[in-house]
Image (cartoon, rainbow, N blue to C red):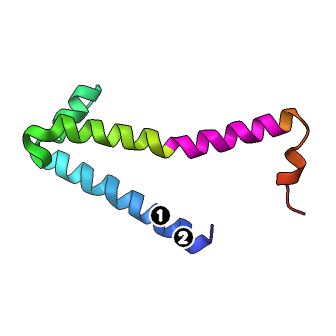
Amino acid sequence: MSASARLFSTLVMFFIILTTAITLNRHGITHIETTRQAAEALRPLAGKFAATLFTVGIVGVGFLAIPTLAGSAAHAFAATLGGAKAWIRN
């Protein structure tokens, strides 16, 4: 991944966090401890569909984790069999 791509993704992440914090703060939501509170924090944005939106987001994050977990498991399996050297670039 190029440095400019990493910078761009980091900036996108930063502004998502910043926008979320500003929105929640304006609605008086400043202390979230449970997933129920996190779902309810979406109510100003999503209305009665806040819980559904939160659930879809959590499931989406789970699907994004699948390739990472599969890749790391494959690497661990290859390392166990002594084939991890094929992944190292000279």
Question: Dividing the picture into quarters, in which one does residue 61 lie?
Answer: top left
In the displayed structure, 47 sits above or below 12; it is: above
Classify 10 Å Cα crowding around label 2: few (below 14), some (14-19), many (20 and above): few
Specify whether 65 is left or right of 89: left
Q: Is residue 70 magenta?
A: yes
Residue that numbered label 2 is attached to: 5
- Residue 66 visible in the snapshot: yes
Q: Which residues are magenta?
A: 65-78
**Residue 39 x/y as whole percent:** 22, 34
Q: Residue at x 62, y 71 (%)?
A: 2
Say the numbered circle drawn on residue 9: 1
Give the quadrant of the C terminus. bottom right
Specify whether 54 is left or right of 79: left
Classify 10 Å Cα crowding around label 1: few (below 14), some (14-19), many (20 and above): few
Give the quadrant of the N terminus. bottom right
**Residue 82 x/y as whole percent:** 91, 38
